[in-house]
Image (cartoon, rainbow, N blue to C red):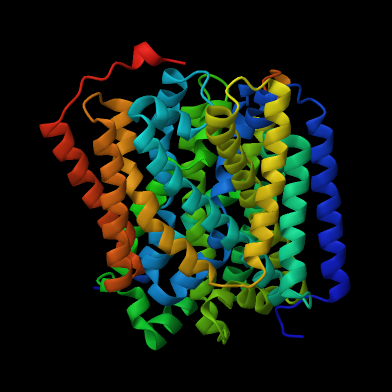
Amino acid sequence: MSDIQISLDNAIAILVAFSVLWIAWGWYLGRKNKNADDFALAGRNVGFALATSTAMATWVTSNTTLVAPQLTYQFGVWGMLGYSMAALGLILFAPLAKRIKQLMPKGVTSGDFIHQRYGRFAWAVFMVVSFCYALGWLVSLGMAGGVLLSALSPLSYETGMTVIVVVCVSYTLLGGLRAVIATDFAQTLIIIGGVCYIAYASLTQNPLPEVYEAVSQTQPELLNLLFPAALMFFFNNIFFGIGEIFHSNVWWSRAFAFAPGVGKKSFLVSGLMWMPVPIVTGFIALSANSLGVFPPSPDMVGPMVAAKVLGSAGAILVFVVVFSALASSMDSLLAATADLMTHDLYRKYLMPAASTEQLMTMNRFMLLLLGLFTWLMCLPRVATLGALLNFTGAFVASTIWPIIYGLYGNKLNGTGAALAMVFGTVSGLICYFQVGFYTAAISSCAVSLLTCWYFKRFQAIDYKWQEQEG
Amino acid sequence: MYVSEFFLEIVVVSALGLSCCTPVLLLVLLIRDIKSKSLW
């Protein structure tokens, strides 16, 4: 057993305790769900505190707790600052959330908006992008669960992955979005509290002047503000984060679910509160050198520093934080993707006259199906978390401009929006394979903008939102 | 062009300070929402 591993007994005790807690809570909250809106959108009246915490918790994934230290370890100061810029996605989505609620007070998914505003062709392209991203993220979270829980304890990859998938599916199935939002609140407190304690302990044992001295002597490039790959990563990550949030039904379903007047301020506050978190987790990685920690793989730098600073208690704390971070994102993604499948595929094309009971049943069935799909895809452990996620950057960044022009403009037509997503994604993928992962999102966004601009300039329409409202 | 120790200290200590405030702020907001019956 390595320094960062906790004992099998402790691992099982933690997993059982948290699993029972989340599932029981999900069941308790699920009793209030009377119709499809209650299940999918928590009754459309979520208050400020829960709205802010769920936006923040969903955006704090295993990436924030493990990949942010990894990127700081590889790209230095720009790694942690670049990662923290992903908060811009939440901050810039704040006005959009208000606009979405105004334009579509009875909307359910992001697909509803694209279908109404741009028509069937753009909707079909958007759904492909959405599903590629959602399934990529779901599978990467499932795999991360297996990889991390097996790295942090003697549990096998299959056991760790199965536990995280089964627990998240169970409580989401029982409680719907209400359970997701309520557990997110508790998970936010656990994650932020744990991360702050580890960083504080690290600073106390290993003061900042010593960290700076060690880094400047052994890896001075980590402090270099003109580190080219790190600079490119910084800007790419901004567009990746914005694309992820602007298009994903995870965030649109929250915009629909939050009470009137809550969406804008809760996204703004959650973005501002999220911004320092990757800097705190990233700093933990900068301490590695001066503490004599040399991880076998860069993504283990965070847990290894925590174990070095806090001993076995640190390993347990990391295990709990990572489990909470994984669950807080996976539950949201499961719920939002099941909504997309239920409302955009089943209700729109298979059963337009479905009753609210039928929609609730179908939503639960889709959740189970997604859980099973995720579990099956995670079993062979086909790719790494980072590789999967960066690949989706090419897809999501292409949706930024069609969504902005759709919400705030009236000139862009459906063909322009669809082609902007197609051309953007293709150029992003070319850059991903030919140049590097850190160029996929930025090139996708730029080509998508040019396409939108062309159609707005030469094939402009005069769309009237009011005519198709609600 | 390298980051100075002072800059790093400002960034890290500010980030840690702000992060520590987050759980407190969320709990205050939660209590406020419960009192005003606007939790859900």
In the displayed orientation, state which residue is furthest to the left. A458
State left or right for residue B32 relative to residue A248: right
Q: Is residue A235 visible?
A: no
Q: Residue at x 61, y 64 (%)?
A: A200
Q: Residue at x 39, y 84 (%)?
A: A219
In the displayed orientation, state which residue is furthest to the top. A467
In depth, the one of A32 and A310 nearer the eye is A32
Q: Residue at x 72, y 85 (%)?
A: A2
Looking at the picture, does residue A259 appear above or below residue A145? above
In depth, the one of A329 and A73 nearer the eye is A329
> How many callouts does the rendering have?
0
Quadrant location, the N terminus of chain A: bottom right
State left or right for residue A15 relative to residue A98: right
In the displayed orientation, state which residue is furthest to the front. A350
- Residue A165 at x, y = what percent? 71, 56
Place residue A80 in its image quadrant: bottom left
- Residue A231 at x, y = what percent? 28, 66
Q: Residue at x 70, y 55 (%)?
A: A372
- Residue A213 at x, y = what percent? 42, 81
- Residue A466 at x, y = what percent? 35, 12
Q: Is residue A20 visible?
A: yes
Looking at the picture, does residue A434 appear above or below residue B18? below
State left or right for residue A462 relative to residue A303: left
Looking at the picture, does residue A26 appear above or below residue A382? above
Looking at the picture, does residue A26 appear above or below residue B3? above
